[in-house]
Image: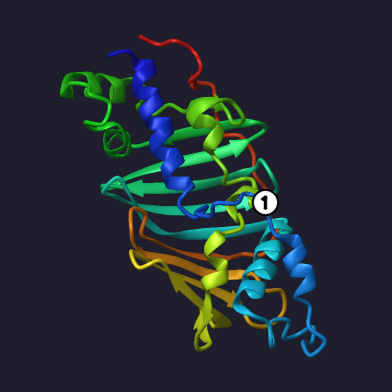
Amino acid sequence: MAKRSLLGVVALSVTAAVTLTACGEDTKADAKVARDSVSASASPTTPLKNLAPAEIAAKSRLAMTKLRSFQVKGTGTVGGKKMTLNVAVAGKGNCLGTIGVKGGTGQVRWYGGYTYMTGDRRFWHALVGEEAGATPQQVDAFVDWLDGRWLRKPAGGTGANKAFPFCDAAALFPKDSSDSGLTRGADTEVNRTRGVTLTGGDGATARTLVVAAEGEPYYLRTSIKGGELPQTFEYSGFNKPLTLGPPPIANAIDGTQQQR
């Protein structure tokens, strides 16, 4: 099997991991709803007071798309594989993070219009595995080829690589058509920050969104239980200084070339 085919499996697997949080059906932030939801009874310190759940969701989504930087970390399951994710985002098109799967750890960076990936042997084995239809010998040879090297691909191309949304907050926090069914629960705390709890679901899945109750209504936690993509993510580091750059790429592999 061509290495190019195996590279495609890697791209699809990492795409699935980093798109876990982007579960909405409408990819445009609903800024109008957020603007219209400003209540005369709400103060600058309690911006969500007396707002409907759907209005809170729209307002918080808009706040997230305006951030200069933030961090998201958590776990999710894709194709039966449990993955951990920890990503720092600094503006559209620039971010870095780690992905853990089946005891392996990988690093992913998006910078200067390119996606970079590297990882240990367990990481590459977990991503490729049997999904590519390759023999164990072919997979071992492919992992040997990648070992200690960075895979580099354009971040705005076509196919699987076009699906990476993690450096684009508008794509990461799309409008969700199920917002209208959200209900407000009891306030809670996430990392010592008081939050408003919104819950919803469609029978097969249960969705929870916790939004900061005071100050800017940033996401504190999102989770989905049940369904094909169960996940829990927490958000922090809002607008904190973050400097990113490309990795050492003297030994980078050009993922766009035909490798056999």
Q: What residue lies at 48% left-to-right and 31% top-to-bottom? A: 160
Residue 180, quarter of the rendered image: bottom right
Quadrant of the rendering where the N terminus is positioned: top left
Q: Dot 1 lies on which element?
A: loop
Is 124 above or below relative to 44?
A: above
Q: What residue lies at 79% left-to-right and 90% top-to-bottom? A: 41
Q: Tell me where residue 168 appears, x and y as whole percent.
A: 64, 46
Three-letter amino acid code of the residue under disc 1: Lys
Residue bearing mark 1:
28
Q: Tell me where residue 228 appears, x and y as whole percent.
A: 33, 53
Q: What residue lies at 25% left-to-right and 19% top-to-bottom? A: 141
Q: Is residue 78 visible?
A: yes
**Front residue of 146 and 201:** 201
The answer to whether 223 appears left or right of 26 in the picture is left
The answer to whether 194 appears left or right of 102 in the picture is right
Is 43 above or below relative to 201?
A: below
The answer to whether 65 appears left or right of 137 in the picture is right
Is 66 above or below relative to 46?
A: above
- Residue furthest to the right in view is 40
Q: Tell me where residue 169 appears, x and y as whole percent.
A: 65, 52
